[in-house]
Amino acid sequence: MQGWAVVETGAPLKEVSAPTPEPKGTEVLVEVTHCGVCHSDLYFQDGHYDLGGGKRLSLADRGVTLPLVLGHETVGRVVKFGPDAKGVKVGDHRVVYPWIGCGNCKRCRSGEEQLCLTPGTIGVFRPGGYGSHVIVPRAEHLVDLAGVDPAVAATYACSGVTAYSAIKKVLPLAPDDPVVIIGGGGLGIAAIKILKALKHQAIIVVDVDKAKQEIALQAGATAAVGGKDVDTTAEIIKAAGGPVVGVIDFVNSSSTAKAGLDALTKGGTLVLVGLYGGDITISLPMLPLKGQSIRGSYVGNLQELRELIDLARSGDLEPLPVERVPQAKANEAINRVRKGEVKGRLVLEVPSF
């Protein structure tokens, strides 16, 4: 098998090769056809996360070892499986749920594998979809994509299910209760389209880039605010007609998190998703006095991915704009994401598909 890997942090990806693994037990060998290029791949290439206050979390601190074949938004065809794998057959075309846990702890048994303390995430702790093949530990992590464009389906494994899970954390809301989406990039656009599919009628997007604001409005946002040297909180409240019940921050910087928190009404929820980095100072008494909640949201669970694929299959979820890029151009693709040159999502595609 071959793949594009982080061999040295801060450096371009390198093509690597290794023997194609033989699936054992419940394992399934999947030949990759598509893999999304996710913004979080940049953190793996850089080798760290900004924790704020001058602190960093390195890949080594997370238990990630190099070389690492990137790619956690994978779609592929089953080519082989172990003797104990059930419910799978050769030729199945599936979305790979990558946020895999140990399978035995309370979190995993409750269906929240993404919160397992000993994760085995594909594309993070296991070779991912920037390669020719991936090993999936159990067939249950393969989701049928019939009726959905496989390039679009690949993005649902991370950005899609991340947006969907974050949205569920501010629900239930009345359809006309404004929901604020901070960040008009791929995650923000995915959230707008999902909210539309769920029949939500009031969606405010916040972004400093006017071009991204326009794209968000075209995607279905009902208002767009933000820019340099503006009072973001005041603009949100003006656009919403008052403080808001739900804010989802797909950037999660010091400034965006503060703006989102300050825009909340009593009983409101701020969901923090992005990994930009930074910190904020919070007046602790005000949280109970206002009954507000601040929640982190890390990707989504397997059931949420299934629900999202079903929503896409129903025709209610409008697909994201996707640009297919040959897998051999992985470096070019990840550099375009870094430069912010992408409208929608880039998906690596195996030419023979």
Image: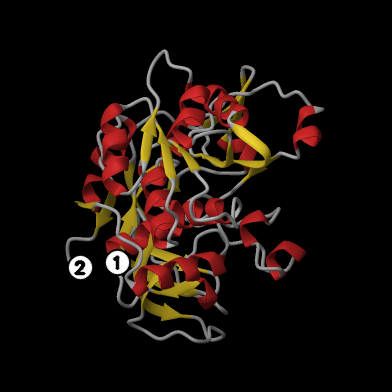
Please say whether residue 66 is visible from this viewpoint: yes
The quadrant of the rendering that contains the C terminus is: bottom left
Please say whether residue 335 is visible from this viewpoint: no
Q: Amino acid at mark 1?
A: Pro
Residue pictured at 45% horizontal, 73% vertical: 143
**x and y percent of residue 315 in the render?**
32, 70
Q: Height in image: 270 above or below 279?
A: below
Residue pictured at 38% horizontal, 16% vertical: 228
Sequence-wise, the earlier of marks 1 and 2 is: 1
The answer to whether residue 235 is left or right of residue 11 is right
Q: Height in image: 320 above or below 138?
A: above
The quadrant of the rendering that contains the N terminus is: bottom left
Residue 353: mark: 2
Q: Quadrant of residue 41?
A: top left
Outermost front residue = 241
Q: Quadrant of residue 74?
A: bottom left
Residue 34: mark: none
**x and y percent of residue 282 in the render?**
72, 24
Outermost top residue = 229
Q: Amino acid at mark 2?
A: Phe
Residue 150: mark: 1
Q: Quadrant of residue 138?
A: bottom right
Residue pictured at 31% horizontal, 39% vertical: 334
**x and y percent of residue 332 in the render?**
23, 38
Which residue occupies the foreground of this view, 227 or 166? 227
Callout in the foreground (1, 2):
1
